[in-house]
Amino acid sequence: EEEKGLNFIEEIIEADLAAGKYNSIITRFPPEPNGYLHIGHASSICLNFGLTLKYPGYTNLRFDDTNPVTEDTEYVESIKEDIKWLGFTWKNELYASDYFDQLYTFAIKLINKGLAYVDDSTSEEIAAMKGTTTQPGVNSPYRDRSVEENLELFARMKAGEFPDGSRTLRAKIDMAHPNMIMRDPVLYRIKHAHHHRTGDAWCIYPMYDFAHGQSDSIEEVTHSLCTMEFVPHRELYDWCIEKLEIYPSHQYEFARRNLNYTVTSKRKLLQLVNEKHVTGWDDPRMPTISGLRRRGYTPFSIRDFCDRIGIAKRENMIDVSLLEFCVREDLNKSALRRMVVFDPLKVILTNYPEGQEELLQSEDNPEAETITHRDIPFCRELYIEREDFMEVPPKKFFRLAPGQMVRLKSAYIIRCDEVVKNDAGTITELHCSYIPESKSGSDTSGINVKGTLHWVSAKHAVSAEVRLYDRLFRVEDPSSEEGDFKSYINPDSLQVIDHVYAEPALLKSSFDERYQFLRKGYFCLDKDTSEEKLVFNRTVTLKDAWAK
Ligand code: ATP
Ligand code: MG
Ligand code: MG
């Protein structure tokens, strides 16, 4: 294994540990429970949890649930399931909403210090007074209220005496501050809304900037890692900690990771779900962790992907083929090899005795440490893939053609003797002869053939449905295109083949196994599987179909 250099966060942590600033570190993963986690979040999870696996310390899971309107316990549950599935264990399960009392006390402290005031301006008025990057803002007419008046009004805000949007609590900083975020930011807003955990206990809710850093501080998070859009918020983060005189957590920013041919924004993914462009958050075409899981991605492949892309300070687009590469690498080692014919052409072995059948042995996985085998029934009538036969083959067509020989995987060499067609001229079956001495593993025929085909016994074949997926969007970055990102959805992202012919071993498929359908790709059982029907998802093809 090649030694990788430290990323810039690791450099900071190693310097902090070396300087004795900390003996151990605390990080947190802070999702807002307003949607399912996506591959971008996986990056942040691997980073936060990875750091405390590498260095002494631990990682908390903290739900940043300060916006009652968009949040839901369904999301809380899915987030926990996804993190566990990725293979990480949090030390404490925490909720910003558990700190509502504490945050309220913090607000009182700022008011008492003359550092916060109740503003009766509307949000439009506040925006109009904000100024621009080149012009200072204007002080609110309510800015100089007395501490007593502020305390009383804030208590009445909490008591529910005022309607939504009628008042806010703002920090009293500087309306001419070069950082726009420092121009008297709103700390609390009135929202008579039901919260998924605190119910109707509160009708004022802290803003992100007055909840996030304080929660970090309460938990004594040492390194608070967030994405680059929070760079301008860092000054306010530090200001609150300083003025409240609380534990000094530090914020560090890294770049968002985006994947091409998809969108990584919960808000946009929610639209895809709500408008039924996909079947749900776990649709196998979704870039969500639950979608990738259902598609057949392994936890290792996603962690490996996050590891390979690492972290950076500049945002960039990651090629989805890297994610596919990672899952191929992993599945090649673990997937059970099986044979499935998608588009059958019947082969009759004219010299194989009628009514006779035998069980052949085939390796489950040639890459495995201990090789195991399964039985495959073989008899006179078989199916091969229609595209594996050509009546008039081009040069170097090493599959089946009139007079040509191929090997059937783990079985015999056969030769095509006769092509049978119906009245319409369509090929209905091939009459072939098999070479009895050519049985795989004990071949004494001396015949060399170049092609090996997958096949199934017609009599023993099991019916299944397969779902083949393509990219969900036609363009690399749908969000940056003109107009609605949804107009760039790929109309052919799902292809269903509802009746394929599978070898009978697949009757015993299970959800935790992965399969390589020979020459077809990697597959897993889908949750739509029922007593009546096996349903498989193609995780990925065997080779990158898009590679030039
Ligand atoms: P979205 O826009 O999808 O809602 P978000 O940042 O609002 O994303 P949060 O629930 O706040 O979602 O995210 C939890 C953590 O994951 C945050 O620290 C956030 O910075 C990080 N994160 C979110 N998206 C990405 C991404 N694409 N790449 C890396 N980290 C991300
Ligand atoms: Mg967020
Ligand atoms: Mg968000």
Image (cartoon, grey):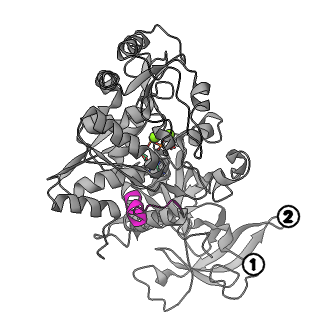
Q: Residues within 10 Å of mark 1 (few under 14, many from 20)?
A: few
Along the line of sight, which residue is nearer the eye, 166 or 285?
A: 166
- Furthest-right residue in this view: 424
Relative side of 283 to 313, left or right? right
Magenta residues (range): 302-316
Identify the image quadrant of the C terminus: bottom right
Relative side of 8 to 13, left or right? right
Relative side of 198 to 468, left or right? left
Which residue position is annotated with label 1?
A: 391
Q: Give me the residue at 45% from left, 39% from top.
A: 182
Image marks 1 and 2: residues in contact by CB distance under 8 Å: no
The amino acid type of the residue labelled 2 equals Asp
Which residue position is annotated with label 2?
A: 423
Residue 36 can be seen in this image: no
The amino acid type of the residue labelled 1 equals Glu
Q: SS of the residue at dot 1?
A: loop
Q: Is residue 230 magenta?
A: no
Q: Name above or below for residue 130 compared with residue 513.
A: above
Q: SS of the residue at dot 2?
A: loop
